[in-house]
């Protein structure tokens, strides 16, 4: 029996905590077959990003067509897309693919390193977000995309409205940078779902955004509705954060295999 197939289009994290590596671990942990289109190679560890090298657009296109045309996909998740030509090429590929799309508009790393050229922001707004089933920005990325500074839950609602104006069907605003409980807001502009979890006393949270978006994509690939997929993803990532572990001298990763331990 052919497994449920999920494709990630993202950058490689050499330290294994985020990016393609986190995506594939999440997809496997959630019972799906993960496949990858690598958009960039980073030199990255627990301390930060020491370097990043974008792959040519033709390499991204070739990887994507190779997987989709032969194996097929039931959901796609995008992550680090560093330049406008790359964003536009991926958006064009996604528009021609009959599968739900989760866009994680990666702008900055956990350590504050910029992963998106300023010139690419407009392409994310006008080309990539309109093809998204779900967009999953954190609060820093909300500010990059909309100019809004979010400091409370009311601000998250305004942020969601602003993101939805760019065209995704759903916005999942990640409020992990606020104080208090870890709260996210999922909305399509008509219905709201507030996803709450206790804030965990664990600094080892590298890869949370990639993991959440990949978990949503895995849920959609398995036939869940967007709210169902988001609730399941929130539960999974909360457990992964709780089990996050030290690795190297900085911020360690979440534990993608926490349910198997």
Image (cartoon, rainbow, N blue to C red):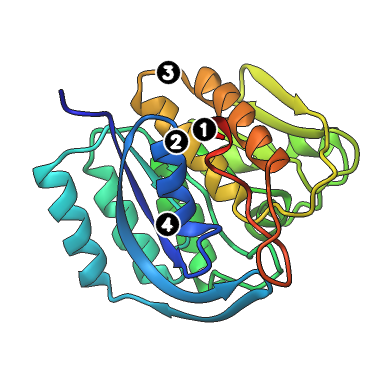
Residue tagged 3:
224
Q: CA distance from mark 4 to mark 1?
A: 21 Å
Which of discs 4 and 2 lies nearer the camera? The answer is 2
Q: Which secondary structure, mark 1? A: helix
Task: Find residue 218 and report its horizontal and vertical position in percent.
Answer: 41, 32
Rendered location of residue 254, percent (x, y): 63, 48
- The tag on residue 29 is 2
User: Which of disc 1 and disc 2 is earlier in sequence?
Assistant: 2
In which quadrant of the rendered view does residue 107 lie? bottom right
Query: Is there CB contact under 8 Å for labels 4 and 2?
Result: no
Q: Tell me the residue that label 1 is attached to.
A: 260
Depth check, mark 4 against mark 1: the one in front is 1
User: Pointer 2 and pointer 3: residues touching (CB < 8 Å)?
Assistant: no
Q: Specify the farthest residue to the right.
A: 180
Residue neighbourhood size for the residue with mark 2, other residues' Cα within 10 Å, grouped as few (<14), some (14–19), many (≥20): some
Find out whether the residues at labels 4 and 1 contact each other: C-beta distance under 8 Å.
no
Q: Is residue 71 left or right of residue 248?
A: left
Q: Going from the N terminus, do you reach mark 2 or mark 3 first?
A: 2
What residue is disc 4 on? 20
Q: Earlier in the sequence, mark 3 or mark 4?
A: 4
- Location of residue 170 with respect to 15 vertically, above or below: above
For marks 1 and 3, the one nearer the N-term is 3
Real-space Cα separation, disc 3 to disc 4, in angstroms: 23 Å
């Amino acid at each position: 029996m052919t497994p449920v197939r999920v494709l990630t289009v993202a950058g490689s994290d050499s330290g294994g905590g985020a990016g393609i590596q986190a995506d594939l671990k999440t997809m496997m942990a959630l019972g799906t077959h993960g496949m990858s289109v690598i958009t960039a190679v980073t030199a990255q560890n627990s301390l930060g990003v020491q370097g990043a090298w974008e792959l040519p657009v033709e390499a991204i296109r070739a990887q994507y067509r190779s997987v989709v045309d032969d194996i097929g996909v039931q959901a796609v998740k995008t992550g680090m897309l560093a330049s406008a030509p790359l964003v536009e090429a991926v958006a064009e590929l996604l528009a021609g693919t009959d599968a739900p799309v989760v866009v994680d508009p990666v702008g900055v790393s956990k350590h504050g390193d910029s992963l998106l050229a300023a010139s690419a922001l407009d392409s994310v707004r006008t080309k990539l977000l309109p093809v998204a089933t779900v967009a999953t920005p954190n609060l820093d990325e909300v500010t990059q995309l909309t100019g809004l500074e979010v400091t409370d839950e009311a601000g998250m609602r305004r942020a969601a409205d602003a993101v939805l104006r760019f065209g995704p069907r759903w916005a999942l605003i990640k409020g992990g940078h606020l104080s208090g409980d870890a709260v996210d807001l999922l909305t399509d502009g008509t219905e709201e779902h507030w996803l709450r979890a206790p804030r965990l006393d664990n600094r080892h949270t590298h890869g949370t955004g990639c993991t959440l978006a990949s978990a949503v994509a895995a849920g959609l690939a398995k036939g869940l509705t967007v709210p169902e997929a988001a609730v399941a993803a929130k539960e999974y990532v909360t457990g992964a954060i709780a089990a996050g572990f030290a690795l190297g001298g900085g911020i360690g990763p979440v534990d993608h295999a926490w349910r198997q331990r």
